Every structure is written in C-alpha cells, then in structure tokens.
Amino acid sequence: MPEALVAALATPGLWAIAATYFCAGVVRGFTGFGTALIVVPVAGIYLAPLVILLMITVSGILSNLYLVPHAWHSADRGEVGALTLGALPGVVLGMFLLNYVEPVAVRWVVAAVSAVTLAAVISGWQWRGRLRAKGLATVGGAAGTVGGLTALTGPIAIMFYLANARQAQAVRANMILFLASLDVLLIGNIAVNGALTAQGIWLGVLVSVPYIATIFVGQALFDPGRERAYRIAAYTIAILALLTGLPIWE
C-alpha cells in the first residue's frame, strides 16, 4: 500500500469528513451545488485550510467526470465562460491571501460566508436582471477569491443564480459547469504553489467514494417539481454543518 495512502487513511477526523461527504453527495446530486458549504465547516475542525482546498478540488474533479457530461447541453456555456474568466485572477488572489491568514481566521471567514449565503437564499431575495460580461466576470472573480482562500467555491455563484429567478434545472446545469471550471483553475494554482501532495490527493480520492456514490442517489431523486423540498433539505444540512464547524466549540 502506498505510503501516502496510509497517511491519508490516518487523517484525523477522516470518518467524520467522509460522513459529511455522504450527505453532501446527495445534495450535490439533486441541486448541482452545496458540497463546499456542507463539507468545509466540518473539515475545518480537523484539517488545515490548504489541505481542505486540495481535498475539495480533487473530489470535485472526480465527481465532475460524471456530472459535467449530463449538464453540458443544458448549461449556458457562454455565461459560464465569462464567470470562469473572471474567476482566474480571483483564484490566484485567494490562494495568495491563504498564505497570510491564520487557520482559525479562515474558519471564521468560512462561517461568515456560509451564513450570509444561506441567509440570502433562504430569505427568497431575488434580482430579475441580467448581467453582461463585465458583471459576470465580477461575480466569477469574487467566487474565485473566496474559493481560493476558503475552498468555498460555490457560495458567491449560488447567491447569484438562486437570487436570479432561474429555473432549478438551469441553475443546476450552470453551477455544475462553473464549479468544474473552478476546480481546474484551483488544481492548477495548487500545483504552481507546490502544494499538490500525494497524501492530499489520496485524501480527496478516499472521500470521493461515499461522495460519488450518493451523487447517484441525489440525481435519481431529482425532480424539478419538487424544487421546494430539495431546497429545504439542502438548507437544513448546510446549517447543521455550519453550526458544527464553528470554532467556538473548541
């Protein structure tokens, strides 16, 4: 057995993180997003921010091998492309900041971003306009910066799409494609920064087992006519993860 795999299996809190991924997979399967909102607050109890970023990115890439082909034809690829171009400098900035921010401070940022995201979407706030390329690039840049710093790649885009009065199926497809693009940007920047470790990659592979298995379950459950039930379930799981991961419990 490879030494890096043995080290990954000995990761503190691995079973708790894997159980969180189990729940996150169901949510990701029927909504197209939510993994980081659920996993990162809990993983922050046990792992350093950069390790979490690598784990989230690897598990995201593996899951995207299945999810992206199904979302490709339903997504607005031009809009996703504009978001991704904006995200590139944001990811670089976020990972730069990660070198200077204390881990506990990062956890508080995670909690704040998660709380604001959930409050915005649960409140039902909606904006019915349409952004042009510069506006989309700004949203992408914000998403990339937050993702590079905290591994929360989805919240900014979640607030944009869920507040934009789109149909659930369209939101789901665009989110899958955009998060897949962010994963590619992140893994490239992680490699450039010399943080692409064998142990971290194996950790991402290990948690992908329960994650991908339950994504299939979530996709099988997906029914646009049950959008309200899906959102309530996703919000409940995310709130529980947020409360569990608050640094005040330590």
Image (cartoon, helix red, strand yellow):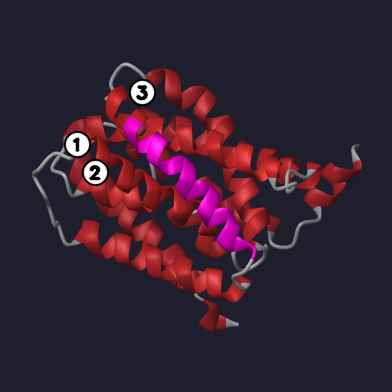
Q: Is residue 239 placed above or below 22 in the rendered structure?
A: below
Q: Residue at x 36, y 53 (%)?
A: 155
Name the dominant secondary structure of the magenta segment: helix
Q: Residue at x 20, y 38 (%)?
A: 226
**Which stretch did the figure color magenta?**
82-99
What element does badge 1 sit on?
A: loop
Q: Amino acid at mark 1?
A: Arg
N-terminal of the two: label 3 or label 2? 3
User: Do labels 3 and 2 touch, CB within 8 Å?
Assistant: no
What element does badge 3 sit on?
A: helix
Q: Is residue 153 visible?
A: no
Estimate the x, y position of residue 90 in percent, counting from the top left: 46, 49
Residue bearing the label numbered 1: 132
Q: Amino acid at mark 3?
A: Ala
Position of the N terminus by quadrant: top right
Question: What is the number of the mark on residue 104?
Answer: none
User: Do labels 2 and 1 touch, CB within 8 Å?
Assistant: yes
What element does badge 2 sit on?
A: helix
Residue bearing the label numbered 3: 71
Q: Residue at x 54, y 37 (%)?
A: 185
Q: Residue at x 50, y 23 (%)?
A: 66
Residue bearing the label numbered 2: 135
Estimate the x, y position of residue 249 in percent, counting from the top left: 55, 82
Hey, which quadrant is residue 207 in on the image? top right
